Amino acid sequence: MGFLQQLAGRVEEVAAAGGKFADAFVRTAGATVSGALVFVDREIGFAAQAAKKRNATKSEGRKRPAEK
C-alpha cells in the first residue's frame, strides 16, 4: 500500500503546482485511479484467501472411494 500512498502524494504535488482547472482535473483523476487500485488490491486479497480455503478443504475433506 506504500506505492499507492506515494502516488497519491505526487498527485497532490502536481495539483498544487497547476492552476484551478489542472488542480481539479488532477485531483479527480488521482482519486479515481487511487480508488481503482485499492479496489483491485482488495479483490486480489479476497481471491488469495478463497484459494487458500479451497485448497485446505479439498485436501482434508475428500477421500477416494474404496474399490469393490
Image: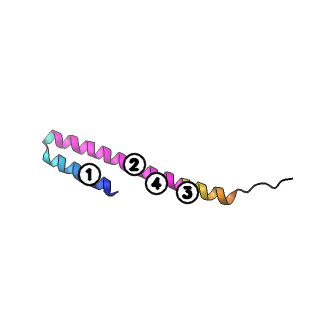
Q: Which residue is mark 1?
A: 8
The disc at residue 45 is: 4
User: For mark 1, does the 10 Å Cα neighbourhood hold few (<14), some (14 to 19), or many (20 or more) residues?
Assistant: some
| Mark 4 Cα-neighbour bin, 10 Å: few <14, some 14–19, many ≥20 | few
Amino acid at pointer 2: Phe
Residue 41 lies, in percent from the top left, at 41, 51
Mark 3 or 2, nearer chain start? 2
Nearest-to-viewer mark from 2 and 4? 4
Give, as a three-letter code, the residue at label 3: Lys
Q: Secondary structure at mark 2?
A: helix
Distance CA(mark 2)–CA(mark 4): 10 Å
47 relative to 23 in the view: left or right: right
Q: Secondary structure at mark 4?
A: helix
Q: Mark 2 highlights which residue?
A: 39
Residue drawn at x 50%, y 54% is 48
* Disc with the residue nearer the chain's start (2 vs 4): 2
Distance from disc 1 to disc 3, alpha carbons, whole Å, reads 32 Å
Residue type, numbered disc 1: Ala
Residue 47 as seen in the image, left or right of residue 67:
left
Q: Which residues are magenta?
A: 21-50
The Cα atoms of the two marked residues, 4 and 1, are separated by 21 Å
| Magenta stretch: helix, strand or loop mostly | helix
Where residue 6 sits, quadrant-wise, is bottom left
Pointer 3 and pointer 4: residues touching (CB < 8 Å)? no
Query: Mark 1 or mark 2: which comes first in sequence?
Result: 1
**Residue 14 lies within the magenta run:** no
Name the residue located 65 percent from the left edge and 55 percent from the top edge. Answer: 58
Question: From mark 3 to mark 2, how far is it between C-alphas?
Answer: 20 Å
What secondary structure is found at the residue carrying circle 1? Answer: helix
* First along the sequence among labels 4 and 1: 1
